[in-house]
């Protein structure tokens, strides 16, 4: 019996609730501040001050406070004097649900609740947040927050924030979507300092209604946004977020900062589960959807600022020409670029010859190009490097020395949209800030120091690489059907055999006599293992003995296995030496089916050198995963070792993903080690986990299926009662009718892995 892997709902045009647009929130004609105050220290007063510019532009700004005769008594009263699309609610948490209901009934189509005291505080706050969600569901009003410092929409004149200084944030092409209101403002201020303007900056807070995917969908249709900075702390709906990012990156770049690098996950289901933490999985999912990844907020500003100004044409491995007016900063820049795996090719002899006519002979000119203290020739140097056939983007750095050279004029003169430039301009003061703004206005990305140039270049190249990949059309492939119940190693490897994954020749043995016959049949040396589906880490209990070549060695190994309670054995031919990988497929609770590839064996969790993808994916996409591994050099003939055939690996990885997607009865499958040998890939051990079903978590195959029944259900350190079905090898099945099953404990309580 086979199953077919379905398509996932992650297409770029997948949009949920697209009809519920956010125009009333981000481009209102009228705003009511509920809880406005004449006390300048209060939140309502601060918001009213921030929104005064909206009123000055002709927007209707209504102040609401039922205890102040100078203001409107209610949102309903305010709506009688002008439009109220947006209600800014600045009242205690306990009365927010009622105020939100009143605002919706008065005709407001959007609201922001800035204050806290909701689910983030626990206790009664959870119930209050649930009340807000109920009002949203009943009335259709869009709600940002609660527990947020608001948003900025400078183009619309809306500074819906109580944070001082927001009026200094000017309109521009960069949008910010942040989980935290504080981070939203921090990024907006950093971008402003870097010379960039803001198209929209949103802090989501508790995100009862308006979520990151909602705002990303809104921005996909915003022609005024050039690039989007995305800050992620947690993900409620992984496929929804991926779909929104994929749709947006088809139109404009997204740069993502995911929080949680050092939280390695509390749901370790196996070596695979321990490594695929929420941080790793979220980053991998966003990158697969087309986002550029960064590691901190400064890098985020440099990256999104550059992408808002310029983009490198699609290219799988763009080359960088480095031009520096000072050798020391140039070394810092080159070192950072190398750390990002950026290609800095040696310039062609023809290019070097031309540079030799422009620069002093003692300067380095092969790439990087050291100009020495630059002069009027700088524009021609830029142009010469850009003309080199191996150069797709220029990374440059110079100090602000207006008496020596007009850096802005040189960059403008050499500017070529087909070969973008990121120019680091060092210095301080208003003159430097003015020149940086002039460069941005000319379409030249700017940074303040070498690290910023490298971050911007890395983002441009990652974006070009992502856009160079053709959209892979997933072709559904038939895969074996998986049935609930436990799988010992032999049964797990039979599943791999059916997938076309090579395994070692082996014999499952019910007795010592069978084991001796297997040794004779296979010939030594062999591996002898305990064969018990309830033992997931066989090495840790002394359940694996390698290099067994004689009858005496076999008896000694069987004695040791018997001592740990073994009643069945697996005897298999020893594999060729090679490099061990780990390959796993499992159901992530947030993103759904995922695949993980990394350096494997017993070192997998210690090294944590992994690449992750959402499933299903094509063999071609899967074949790119090894390039992300820090230890990838080991897979390319290291010291005479085997060379990985990425095409073969891509087929194996894609097959495991299809198996997981097509079989709801499969929780996880892990191959560890998957050994790279001189003859290709071979699976040395495998673990299959299925959810508890039927009696004892066991569901037998239907009578038409000849595959032996997996037998007892080992879960979380215990074995559920055995139930035999019509497809089993013995005894009538007592599991033909569904019965209650134990509730699966948390992911962190099971630990299958290397045997």
Image (tube, rainbow, N blue to C red):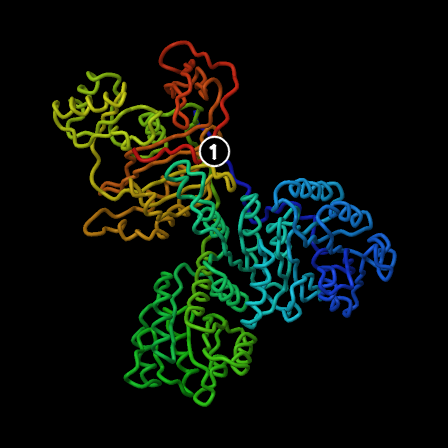
For image coordinates 55% across by 42% down, the residue present is 9
Q: Position of residue 270 (x, y in %)?
A: 38, 36
User: Is 162 left or right of 341, judged from the image as shown?
Assistant: right
Q: Which image quadrant is residue 392 in?
A: bottom left
Q: In front: 637, or 536?
A: 536
The part of the image, by quadrant, that contains residue 752 is top left
In the image: residue 111, left or right of residue 490: right
Which residue is at a point 17% across and 23% down the rendered structure image? 519
Return the x and y of residue 504 as percentages of the image width and height: 25, 31
In the picture, the quarter occupied by the C terminus is top left
Q: Quadrant of the N terminus?
A: top left
Furthest-top residue in this view: 732
Residue 106 is left or right of residue 228, and the answer is right
Q: Is residue 579 above or below residue 537?
A: below
226 to 381, vertically: above or below: above
Residue furthest out toward the bottom: 403
Residue name at image x 35 percent, y 85 percent: 358
Q: Which residue is mark 1?
A: 746
């Amino acid at each position: 019996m086979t199953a077919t892997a379905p398509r996932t709902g992650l297409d770029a045009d997948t949009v949920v609730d697209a009809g519920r647009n956010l125009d009333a929130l981000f481009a209102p004609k009228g705003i009511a501040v509920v809880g406005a105050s004449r006390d300048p220290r209060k939140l309502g007063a601060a918001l009213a001050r921030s929104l005064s510019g909206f009123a000055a532009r002709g927007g209707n700004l209504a102040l609401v406070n039922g205890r102040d005769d100078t203001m409107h008594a209610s949102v309903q009263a305010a709506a009688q004097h002008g439009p109220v699309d947006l209600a800014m609610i600045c009242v205690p948490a306990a009365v927010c649900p009622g105020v939100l209901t009143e605002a919706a009934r008065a005709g407001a189509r959007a609201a922001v609740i800035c204050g806290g005291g909701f689910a983030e505080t626990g206790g009664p706050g959870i119930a209050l947040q649930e009340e807000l969600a109920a009002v949203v569901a009943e009335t259709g009003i869009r709600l940002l927050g609660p527990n947020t410092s608001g948003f900025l929409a400078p183009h619309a004149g809306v500074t819906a924030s109580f944070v001082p200084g927001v009026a200094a944030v000017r309109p521009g092409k960069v949008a910010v979507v942040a989980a935290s209101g504080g981070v939203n403002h921090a990024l907006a201020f950093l971008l402003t300092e870097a010379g960039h303007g803001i198209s929209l900056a949103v802090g989501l807070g508790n995100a009862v209604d308006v979520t990151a995917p909602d705002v990303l969908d809104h921005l996909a249709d915003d022609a005024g946004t050039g690039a989007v900075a995305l800050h992620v702390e947690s993900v409620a709906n992984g496929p929804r977020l991926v779909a929104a990012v994929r749709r947006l990156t088809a139109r404009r770049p997204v740069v993502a900062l995911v929080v949680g690098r050092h939280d390695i996950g509390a749901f370790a289901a196996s070596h695979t589960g321990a490594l695929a933490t929420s941080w790793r999985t979220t980053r991998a999912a966003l990158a697969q959807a087309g986002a550029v990844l960064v590691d901190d907020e400064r890098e985020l500003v440099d990256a999104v600022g550059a992408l808002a100004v310029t983009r490198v044409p699609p290219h799988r491995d763009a080359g960088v020409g480095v031009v520096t007016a000072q050798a020391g900063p140039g070394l810092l820049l080159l070192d950072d670029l190398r750390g990002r795996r950026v290609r800095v090719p040696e310039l062609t002899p023809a290019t070097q010859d031309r540079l030799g006519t422009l620069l002093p002979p003692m300067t380095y000119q092969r790439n990087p190009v050291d100009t020495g203290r630059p002069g009027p020739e700088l524009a021609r140097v830029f142009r010469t490097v850009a003309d080199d056939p191996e150069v797709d983007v220029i990374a440059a750095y110079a100090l602000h020395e207006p008496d020596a050279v007009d850096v802005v004029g040189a960059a403008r003169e050499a500017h070529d949209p087909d070969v973008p430039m990121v120019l680091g301009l060092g210095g301080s003061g208003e003159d430097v800030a003015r020149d940086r703004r002039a460069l941005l206005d000319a379409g030249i990305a700017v940074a303040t120091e070498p690290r910023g140039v490298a971050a911007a270049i890395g983002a441009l190249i990652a974006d070009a690489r992502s856009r160079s990949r053709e959209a892979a059309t997933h072709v559904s492939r038939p895969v074996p059907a998986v049935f609930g119940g436990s799988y010992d190693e032999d049964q797990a490897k039979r599943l791999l055999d059916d997938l076309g994954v090579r395994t070692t020749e082996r014999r499952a043995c019910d007795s010592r006599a069978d084991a001796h016959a297997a040794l004779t049949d296979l010939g030594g040396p062999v591996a002898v293992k305990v064969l018990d589906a309830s033992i997931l880490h066989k090495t840790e209990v002394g359940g694996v003995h390698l290099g067994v070549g004689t009858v005496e060695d076999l008896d000694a190994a069987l004695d040791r296995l018997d001592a740990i309670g073994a009643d069945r054995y697996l005897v298999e031919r020893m594999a060729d030496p090679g490099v061990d990988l780990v390959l796993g497929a499992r159901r992530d609770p947030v993103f759904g089916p995922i695949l993980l590839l990394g350096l494997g064996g017993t070192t997998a969790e210690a090294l944590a050198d992994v690449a992750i993808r959402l499933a299903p994916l094509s063999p071609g996409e899967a074949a790119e995963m090894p390039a992300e591994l820090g230890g990838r050099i080991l897979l390319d003939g290291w010291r005479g070792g085997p060379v990985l055939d990425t095409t073969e690996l891509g087929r194996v990885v894609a097959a495991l993903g299809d198996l997981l997607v097509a079989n709801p009865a499969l929780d996880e499958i892990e191959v560890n080690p998957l050994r790279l040998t001189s003859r290709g890939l071979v699976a040395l051990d495998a673990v299959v986990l299925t959810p508890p079903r039927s009696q004892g978590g066991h569901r037998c195959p239907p009578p038409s299926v000849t595959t032996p029944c997996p037998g007892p259900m080992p879960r979380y350190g215990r074995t559920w009662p055995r139930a035999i079905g019509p497809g089993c090898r013995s005894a009538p099945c007592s599991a033909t009718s569904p019965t209650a099953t134990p509730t699966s404990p948390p992911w962190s309580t099971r630990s299958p892995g290397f045997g």
